[in-house]
Amino acid sequence: MKVIVWILVVTITLIALPLRMECSDEGPEYGIYLFRQGKDELAIPELERTLYYHESAPDAPYLKLLLGLSYARSGQYGSALSLLSALVEELEDTPHGIRKEKLSCETTFHILNIYFRQKRFTDFYYGREQLALRCPELDTALASSVQYMSIAGHIYTFDWKAALGELEMSPLQSTDFLKEQIEPLVGYRSKSPVLGGILSIIPGLGHVYAGRFGDGIRSLLINIAFVSLSYFSFKEDMPALGAVFGVIEASLYAANIYGGVNAVNQENARFFIEKRESILKQIPVPPLDIITLRKELDF
Amino acid sequence: MRFLAPYLLLFLLVGFSAPAENAYEVLVSEGGEKETYPLITLYQQVISRHDGPRCLFYPTCSEFCNQAFSQHGVFWGALMTLDRLFYRERPGSMKYYRLLDDEERYDDPVEHNYIFEKAGYYR
């Protein structure tokens, strides 16, 4: 009997005690921790929840930035852009302190980073001007990253001259290896497709001019074969067959000229695309991560 | 015969075929994003099915022909297809093209072959 009474007393006491066993949802630490670990699928709902309950908390803008970056890292660029743009506007309306300015600059920088990743270069270059106006004394890490991204943007759009101009104007250190690669491309004279077409009057020569020797020889042999077939058909009193071979040869000859022009165009494009790829591989792109605010966010 | 099959197809196509149309293509998808030529369909479903896949490029030669004809008309489409079939469809040409992810075929879409639009080559 005594045992039963004791067990009952302990049980009732346990039930009655105001124990709080659930996780605390007071602070944003868990969301920040998940972001730092790179677990964006988990960080997004956690940060969204924290922001929902603590919208006017002093750290809310920082959390919005983290949430925007989490969106971007998980590929939701649209959501990221709308959140970060709203954050920049919100920061403009509030009285400025040093911390707010730093936050605004980094947020604008990440908007640029997202534009860059979306290949929206017009928006990127416009945004860069805005960033220069808004943050005249930009952090060195951010400034150099913006420079690299704008150079990469020009290279991506095959604007070698603008890329070289950007490199010469920029205060970036040790970019000579990029200059060396871009300089020969500025005045590079591509092969002329018109000349390729004219040369193709002799079958295959256009392909050879483009650098495709195998295709050129093939073209020459095919044309010789059909001309011979047509010629010998007429010679041996088979005009119908000769006419058929003649029509075939005429169309193949026209296709040979088309192919000469096409081969030159394709080779020109291939040359520039290969150059672009090799140069872009050497240009660093900033990560979608906190860069200057690590101290503020206790990273 | 193998050599002649795409060739005959092409010339028959220029002479006699017309793009298939139906109410859906005309009304819903505004003319249809993709026209299909009956003789190409015939080639794909009858000849190519028995002959086996042998095209080294993607899109395949018959599909390339289909797209070239529907995008650029019969004249330029025929030249583009002839250029590909007769002068480039061979293993030696492959080094000029990018290998696709499946590592079986090489990338050569119609946009990379239309000589009057330079931007197409840089896509």
Image (cartoon, rainbow, N blue to C red):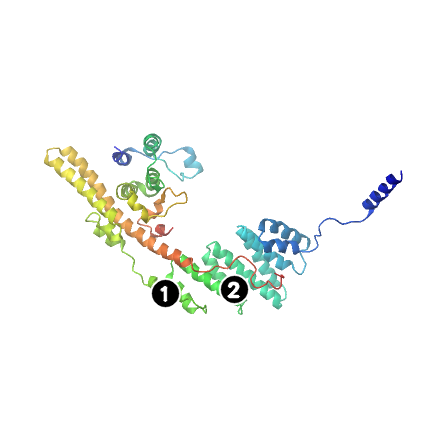
Same subunit under labels 1 and 2? yes
The residue to which callout 2 is attached is A142
Task: Reply above or below: A100 against B109.
Answer: below
Q: Quadrant of residue B34?
A: top left
Residue A264 % position (x, y)? 28, 52
Task: Reply above or below: B29 against A282.
Answer: above
Q: Which kind of residue does numbered mark 1 sit on?
A: Glu
Q: Is residue A171 left or right of residue A58?
A: left
Residue, x 82% and y 48% (percent of image)? A17
Residue, x 50% and y 59% (percent of image)? A286
Q: Secondary structure at mark 1?
A: helix
Residue, x 61% and y 56% (percent of image)? A64
- Which residue is at the front of the view, B44 or A81? B44
Q: Is residue A249 left or right of residue B6?
A: left
Q: Nearer the viewer, mark 1 or mark 2?
A: 1
Q: CA distance from mark 1 to mark 2?
A: 25 Å
- Which residue is at the front of the view, A221 or A239? A221
Residue B65 % position (x, y)? 32, 39
Residue A211 % position (x, y)? 26, 52
The residue to which callout 1 is attached is A180
**Residue A163, disc:** none
Q: Which kind of residue does numbered mark 2 sit on?
A: Leu
Using the rendered image of the protein, determine whether residue A164 is visible from the camera's viewpoint: no
Chain containing mark 1: A
Can you say which quadrant of the picture contains the N terminus of chain B? top left
Task: Reply above or below: A203 against A60.
Answer: above
Using the rendered image of the protein, determine whether residue A241 is visible from the camera's viewpoint: yes
- Which residue is at the front of the view, A10 or A208? A10
Task: Reply above or below: A12 against A238.
Answer: below
Q: Secondary structure at mark 2?
A: helix
